[in-house]
Amino acid sequence: MSPSSPETLPLEGSTGSTLGTDMVHQQTPVEWPRSEVIPARARRDAGVQVVGRVIPTVAISPTTSAKRQAMACDGLAVEVVDIAASARVEYQFSGDRHLLAVAVQTVRRAGETFVQGLPASTLRHVSGRMSFVPAGHRYYERHELEGLSQAIFIYLDPAALPIPDTTGPRVHFRDTLIFTLALNLKEVIETSCLDADYLRAVGVVLAHQLHLPDRDQRKFRGGLARWQQRAVAGHIEEHLDEPLQLSELARLARLSPYHFARSFKQSFGLPPHRYHVMRRIERAKALLATSAMSVTDVGFALGFVETSTFTATFRKVTGLTPTAFVRSQVDRPTQ
């Protein structure tokens, strides 16, 4: 296999200390040119070596609970981690790279999230939230999950993607642009459409956005206050299988439906119904990829009465039918 035709491979059973490459079955990491994307491979004794450096990754315990997929290029490495339903899992990290931990889907019965320099968070519904761990800081997270969980870990090299030293740690913040960029990187991994120039461009934008003031600390003119965002986002996550009731969300935010709809879009970057659809499809992808449920059952579980409606909505959002998405997961090469 040559670097010109890369593949993204699952990190099965990884200890989480390094990203593995070994695409040509060598015993030591391969030093790749700056111009190439490096897809990671399942290895316990090797790592991605970019310009002579091994990239550390989040340690996950127990290792058997995690399915890991990753890719890297000079300055940026990305992992998508899927955790089995109702598992107990711990994450730990401390390294010379900045870490952005993105909870795509996570609801926990109990647990905590700790980033050195900040109080621990015990928030249960953390889907859509992110934590930023500056290089050299310690990160620890423990989940006792209520269902399936998916996270994205993004590692940024300070030398290639500088972020000002004044950028401090953050726990469970929201930022629509950063979250969308993370989802785009996840999509690149899942579809194996690796492009070094695109990855670097996303890395530059992420580095820029991360040092901007936390936009959720402010109330945008016409936007929702932070407590309102937490209330409505949590309600949506807990009722993905039900039709969206704008009046109920407005009641939670203590606004009229008209003002709520305008304020929601200002804060989340999407109208309420589109945000609801996006979250439903993300949940559907997690179920299709990590459970034995049929396409029809997944659609019903998320409130779609007709399989055809679910299929059309899924395809509109992802560009694939549910069946094609499942096939892409099954056909992904493994070691």
Image (cartoon, rainbow, N blue to C red):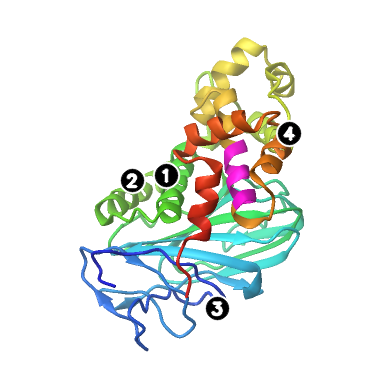
Q: Position of residue 298 (x, y in %)?
A: 68, 42
**Is 269 located above or below residue 159 in the figure?**
above
Residue topped by disc 4: 239
Amino acid type, mark 4: His
For the point 27% across and 57% down, the residue is 196
Q: Nearer the viewer, mark 4 or mark 1?
A: 4
Judge whether residue 203 can be spotted in this image: yes
Residue topped by disc 3: 15
Mark closest to the chain's N terminus, 3 or 1: 3
Q: Position of residue 121 (x, y in %)?
A: 68, 54
Amino acid type, mark 1: Leu
Cα–Cα gap, marks 4 and 3: 35 Å
Mark closest to the chain's N terminus, 4 or 1: 1
Mark closest to the chain's N terminus, 2 or 1: 1
Q: Secondary structure at mark 4?
A: loop
Q: Are marks 3 and 1 in contact (CB under 8 Å)?
A: no
Q: Position of residue 148 (x, y in %)?
A: 68, 54
Along the line of sight, the residue nearer the viewer: 165 or 245: 245
Q: Which mark is residue 205?
A: 2
Q: Are marks 4 and 2 in contact (CB under 8 Å)?
A: no
Along the line of sight, the residue nearer the viewer: 274 or 129: 274
Q: Secondary structure at mark 3?
A: loop
Residue topped by disc 1: 181
